[in-house]
Image (tube, rainbow, N blue to C red):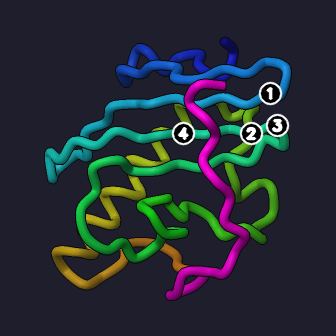
Amino acid sequence: MRLEYGLREHYPYERVSTNFRLQAFVWRVRIMVPVYDEQFVLRIELDERHAVRVTAEGWQGPMRHTFGANRLCMWFPKDPPDRQWSPADRLLKLVDTAVAHLFKELYFRETGEWLGEEVHREVPKIEQRAPLDDAA
């Protein structure tokens, strides 16, 4: 699959669900956060509108930038397209961005300082959608 190009060389992953008719996909990617040596599994959901959700499975405790339920807020939903991920960027860039985000979350937990830009300090109120079905 073109979205996965280059991913296997950097991260072990599995495609959990594929629904080509609906253009809906789910992946689980094992990652290690550098410096902190903490492992997580990223659950990546891509729906038919190319909306993507990345969840850090195994994360314990609060996060500073999340949409709730450990779903990472890696960009502001109203950011221009060049500041958001798109399928043309492929999954490798999305996973690398998520690893950097989790590093910032761990650093914030340790120091109380967020590394990098912050558009908001509270979780934005957005529509909550149910996870894509693994059996699709």
Residue 63: image tag: none
Q: Residue 48: which numbered mark, if any?
A: 3
Q: Do the residues labelled 1 and 2 touch (CB within 8 Å)?
A: yes
State how far apart marks 4 and 3 are (Cα): 14 Å
Mark found first going from the N terminus, 4 or 1: 1
Q: Mark 1 points at which residue?
A: 23
Q: Give the range drawn in magenta.
A: 119-136
Picture residue at 61% right of the left edge, 35% below the top? 133
State the residue position of label 2.
47
Whether tag 3 and tag 1 are in contact, CB under 8 A, the answer is yes
- Which image quadrant for residue 32? top left
Q: Is mark 4 on a helix, strand or loop?
A: strand
Mark 2 packing: few (<14 Cα in 10 Å), some, or many (20+)?
Answer: some
> Residue type at mark 3?
Glu
Mark 4–mark 1 distance (CA, rounded to whole Å): 14 Å
Residue position marked by numbered label 4 in the rendering = 44
> Which of the two discs, 3 and 1, labels the residue nearer the N terminus?
1
Q: What residue type is labelled 1?
A: Gln
Check disc 2 and report its element: helix, strand or loop.
loop
What separation in Å lies between label 4 and label 2 (alpha carbons)? Answer: 10 Å
Say which residue appears at 85% left-offset and 20% top-offset.
21
Type of the residue with mark 2: Asp
